[in-house]
Image: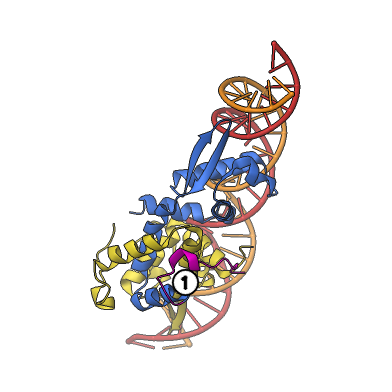
Chain colours: A blue, B yellow, C red, D orange
DNA sequence: GTAACGTGCAACCTCCGGGTTGCAGACGCT
DNA sequence: AGCGTCTGCAACCCGGAGGTTGCACGTTAC
């Protein structure tokens, strides 16, 4: 049923704290548990535990460098989740087109360079 | 921070049971709480409660017809979630291209016509 | 060597969300 | 009207997830 990797991704992203972590790591490029915990009202262990969960979901990747463990996002895991959403939506094609336009700001050639960073809130 | 509508969508989709409900409603086109509960090992009230949560997240829409309340999916709410994922991914553009190819089976010209309905399970 | 930093593991606590039971209110049918 | 069905609301139970404290191990700096 839903025991595939997609399930883990959704479950992992279901928590706002973990989402915040992913977002923060994505913004910094990479980060350690201690670094992330410094800017949060929680303990390092809590962050570490969440990072483990995210890693098991395939959303982040841990890499030990010396005495610290750096984490970086691995967006590949999101593909399955997106696909799931696409399957759920009935007439999605038009929406996907609109989404491309919306995200790329009108032209898909620029790509990452046109990436905008304005917060959604 | 993450108090936007996107947060609710992710939180709602974070539960496998709710995901299953969305999936089932999407497959049937529309359904009632009692109908859905019939094929599940849970009570009608449980389903109803989950449907309420999904409705608050904007993923489904309730509409009362006579004495029964039918639910149908509203995929529009997923856009924000997808956009969030896109923002998280750094070099996402190539992945998005690959995703389009993957989803549409190679050609995006057909659009809705190329939509596939084979279940993933 | 030893002190300081960063990490991982384990036990414990607490709270919230999913589920259930029970009941009362709508609506449809005859 | 009277009965059966579908629904919504409220109170309650319980397991698990997120968080914390405490400690031990590896690593870098002095």
Work out whether D14 lies above or below B92.
above
Percent across and percent down for residue D5 are 39, 74
Question: Residue at image x 62%, y 38%?
Answer: A45
- Magenta span contains residue B79: no
Percent across and percent down for residue A67 are 58, 30
In magenta, the rendered stretch is A106-121
Mark 1 surroundings within 10 Å by alpha-carbon count, few (fewer than 14), some (14 through 19), many (20 or more): some
Percent across and percent down for residue B51 are 47, 68
Q: Is mark 1 on a helix, strand or loop?
A: helix
- Between B81 and B91, the one lying in front of the other is B91
- Between B103 and B38, the one lying in front of the other is B103
- Magenta span contains residue A111: yes
Q: How many marks?
A: 1
Percent across and percent down for residue B26 are 35, 71
Report the magenta stretch's main SS: loop
Instruction: Please indicate, yes or no, whether residue B63 appears anywhere in the rendered image.
Output: yes
- Between A83 and B53, the one lying in front of the other is A83
Work out whether B61 lies above or below A3.
below
Tell me if D24 is positioned left or right of B47 in this view.
Answer: right
């Amino acid at each position: 049923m839903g025991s595939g990797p997609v399930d883990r991704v959704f479950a992992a992203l279901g928590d706002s704290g973990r989402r915040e972590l992913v977002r923060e790591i994505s913004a910094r490029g990479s980060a350690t548990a201690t670094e992330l915990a410094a800017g949060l009202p929680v303990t390092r262990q809590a962050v570490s535990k969440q990072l483990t969960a995210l890693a098991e979901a395939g959303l982040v990747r841990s890499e030990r460098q010396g005495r610290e463990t750096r984490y970086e996002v691995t967006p590949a895991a999101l593909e399955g989740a997106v696909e799931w959403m696409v399957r759920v939506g009935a007439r999605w094609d038009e929406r996907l087109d609109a989404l491309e336009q919306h995200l790329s700001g009108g032209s898909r050639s620029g790509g990452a360079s046109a990436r905008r960073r304005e917060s959604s809130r």
